[in-house]
Structure formats: structure tokens, C-alpha cells
Image (cartoon, grey):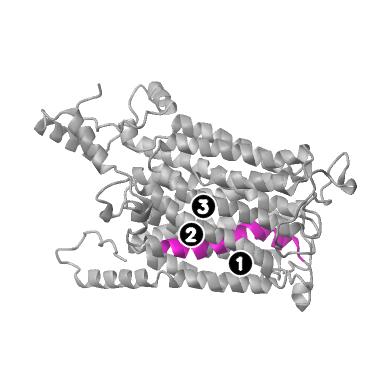
Amino acid sequence: MGSQHELPADRSYSKPLGIRFLEYIKKAKLSYESHQAIVLIVTFFAYASYHATRKTTSIVKSALDPQSSDLGLKFPWRITYLSAPAESKGLSWVLGDGWAPFNGSDGTALLGQLDVAFLSVYALGMYFSGHMGDRMNLRIFLTVGMVGTGLFTSLFGAGYWAKIHSFYYYLIVQMIAGLFQSTGWPSVVAVVGKWFGKKKRGLIMGIWNAHTSVGNITGSLIASALLSYGWGWSFVVPGLLIAFMGLVVFFFLPVSPESVGAYREEDEVDSLRKSEEEEGVTEPLLSSNTEVKEKAVGFIEAWKIPGVAPFAFCLFFAKLVAYTFLYWLPYYISHTDDSFLISLSLFDLAAIEGKYLSNEAAGNLSTFFDIGGVLGGILAGHISDRLDARAITAATFMYCAIPALYFYRSYGHVSVVMNIALMFICGMFVNGPYALITTAVSADLGTHSSLKGSSKALATVTAIIDGTGSVGAAIGPLLTGYISAESWSAVFTMLMGAALVAGLLLTRLVVAEVAARISESRSQGGSQTGSEAPELDV
């Protein structure tokens, strides 16, 4: 039996073994703040490992298909080799030779199809993962997803040593990896959302969301560093990394305050007062009350929560831009020539001081987009907290992304320094609203007042918003494969159009927030001074 003032435990969970070990070492129960720190650290590195495995494909892409002259995606998908063709069979793989079937005339098309397949399954799986995450032990659910992701990421790399040249092998492995990857985001946001209230959530989750960029950077550096030893290592090492982090999640992640009997100071006082007043209340009554409060929200019901739909469709276009950069930026940088200066080349690729860059150098250079994304996520979260205006902040960042994209395309070729600076700015404005919507906004809407206090909608709402965004993430690289065959300038025009539409989709929310701010300023000093702004009904 715990102390008389402990909060009722959620019986669907058990305290992680790692938390018990820490308490044993400390000889005392961990404080609420200690649990919060553990949650932030564990989920940060957990999701960073997800993105590290996701980023490797874009780095290895140029090594698998080093000199493709065909950037368009073709359908139906090509029937490829079940074994290596005669000219490909050799004792070793040499960096620069490519890898069948991706080093053929339609190699880039096949790589683009892998991206589409992965992201399509990921987007579809997201909806189911959110639904399941609100009804399962999130610690177990997340562990299974991470270990599964590690296994199938490693299996993709194993094709190097097994000398597998069947396109369908890589296609199936990528699709299953996408399914396991979909378990990550709904789970980590749901866990963090249960431990942190709305106050300063934007800033906290903005800093925490740096895991996306940290994961991309880590994946880029690992994949680039290992590429010369054989492209298989670029998949296997990140695969082992995420599997290890899955075990850390299993042993250390407390999914909710109730699961570990954690409470704040004020919770303890309230619990003591209630236990004195309700001395005769039986345990079944407490359990019944908890179950009613924590009833999971259905998929359709979650869509009807005010604000979910506009933010979900905004994220569709925001992720279209972000993931086009994620999957194609290293390729865009590495395939540079002087054709940008005369605009006559078939590819119309930007030159950086008129020089070609190696695959490794291009992969390392592309990390500045993610570094900018870290700053963008923190700024967007902090600004939205200060203004108490998520929609205004997200829309403003999306509008600022339009000129940033234009200048990167137009002047990124001038020098490496200019390219890095403009890439950093693009990352800041593109990833800022993406980070804000997938973290603080999702957590806010998952605990919306219309849910009457239930936290069992967090994973579902997060999955709806990010799942819809992931459909855009799949379409962006697909369209890029087609459009880039004609002109990369057209690709950037598409991205700028997507950023504009993303901002416009939030117009109704922006107007409502502006009206709320005006009303609040007029009533300053009145009875509503210091109270929270009302949640917007859309």
C-alpha cells in the first residue's frame, strides 16, 4: 500500500524497471520534476533515432544511383533483377559504381518509388497507430515500433552483403519499415502531453522537437561517414541504434504520472484534503471515476475537435515542403553543374561555385537545413507561447518560407557560404511551423476542453494531424521526381505554392486569434485580466 496521499495509479500500466532501479539507487521516490526530465530525455533520443534511420535513404540515394540521367518517376513499376546482372557481379562494391537495379537509366525513378511507398504506408499506419496508442501501453507499443524499425532498416542494408538486386525486396522492406515508423510520433507526443500542461508547452516542446533535426543530422553524419565502407553500414548502424533506444524506452519511460504514482506539490495537498473528506470512499468508486475520465476518443470524434482539420491540412502542405528537402536536398546539392548559369541543361541544377560535390560532402552540407529547423522550432514555440497564438505564428512562418525558398533557389549557387546561410534560413521557416503543429498544437488539441478533461485523445489527435501531414510528405517527393525532370526551378515554384496554401488554410484561425487578442487588450484591467484566452472553436 502506498502512502495515504498518493494519487490513484493507472492499473493498465506498471512502473518501468529502470525507474524502480533509479528509485532504489536514490533510496527515495523520484519527484514529479525528475520524471518530467526522464520523459523529455528518453523521448528526445527515441524520436531522434527514428529520424536518423529515416534520413539514411536520402544520403545513400546518390551512391546507389550516382549518374542517373532520368529523374522522372515511371509507372508501372519496373520488373527488376532477381540476381545481379552479369556486368554487376563482382567481388566488391566500389563507391561511384552504383547498385543495381538503382544504377540503371531509371534508377532515380525507382528510388523515388521507394520514398513514395515508405511514406504512403507511414501515413496510413499513422492513423491506426494513433488509435491503438490511446488504447495500449504506450511504453510497450513504442518499444515494439522501435525494435521493428531497427530490424527492417538493417534488412535494407543487409541487401549489400547478400548481393540482393531485386527492387521488390527493397520495396517490401521499406514499406514494412514505414509501418513500424508510424508508431513513433503519436506515442512520444502523447507521453509528453500527459506530463506537461499548456503553459509554456510551445517553448518546451519547441526545444524538445529539436530531436527531429538532431536525428536528421545524426543520420546524415553516420550514413555519410560509413558510406565509403559499403552502403549497407549506413543502414545497419542506425538500425542497431534505434533498436537499442527501444530497450531504453522499455526500461525507463514513464508513460503518465498515474503510471508511476507521481504527483505535484499541489496534487499532494488536494489529495490529502480529499482523502480526509472522503474517508469512506471505496477503491472501486475511484477506479470507476478514472475509467470514465480516461475513455478513449474515437477517430471521427477526434476529427470534429475544433482546430484539428485546419491544422491537419496545413501540415499536409508544410510536410510536403519539409520532406521534399529531407529526401531530395542531398541529391540536389551533389548533382551540381554550370547549367544553372545558362539555364539550358536538362536538369537545371544549381551550381555551388561551379563545382561538383561528393555524396558525403552533400550529405554533410544538407544538415544546415536541419540546424535551421532546430532554431525555427524553438522560435515558433516561444513566440506562440508569448502571443498565445499558435495559428498566427504558424501562418507567419509559412509565409516567410516563400521568399526564403526563392532566394535559396536563385542565389544558393553563388558560394558555399551563401548556400549554407540560405539553407539555414529555409530550414528555420519551413520546420518552424511543422514543429509547432506536430507538437504543441497537437498536444493542445488532444486535451481540448470539448474532451472534458480526457487525455485519451492525445495519440489519436496527433496521429490525425501528423498522418494527414505525412500524405503530403509522400506526395512532395513523388511530384519532385516528375517535375525535376524538366526543371528544378519548377520544383521550387511548387514548394513556394505549397507554403502559401499552408498559410492560407489557417486564415480562419488567424482571424479568430487576432479578434481574441483585440478583445483581450480592450478588456485589460477587467475581470478577465490574467485569465487564459478561450480555446478557439472552428
- The residue that mark 3 highlights is 124
Say if the magenta span includes residue 315: yes
Q: Are marks 3 and 2 in contact (CB under 8 Å)?
A: no
> Could you say which quadrant of the image residue 254 lies in?
top left
Q: Secondary structure at mark 2?
A: helix
Residue at (35%, 68%) from the top-left corner? 509
Picture layout, residue 462 above or below residue 520? above
Q: Is residue 120 left or right of residue 42?
A: right
Q: Nearer the viewer, mark 3 or mark 2?
A: 3
Dominant secondary structure (helix, strand or loop) of the stretch shown in magenta: helix
Residue of label 2: 434
- Residue type at mark 1 is Leu
Image quarter where the N terminus lies is top left
Q: Please provide the residue range marked out in magenta.
A: 311-336
Helix, strand or loop at mark 3: helix
Q: Earlier in the sequence, mark 3 or mark 2?
A: 3
What residue is pinned by disc 1?
422
Q: Residue at x 73, y 64 (%)?
A: 71
Residue 225 magenta-highlighted: no
What amino acid does circle 3 point to?
Leu
Q: Quadrant of the C terminus?
A: bottom left
The x and y percentages for residue 203 are 40, 54
Q: Position of residue 445 (x, y in %)?
A: 34, 55
Residue type highlighted by circle 2: Tyr
Quick check: 370 above or below 248? below
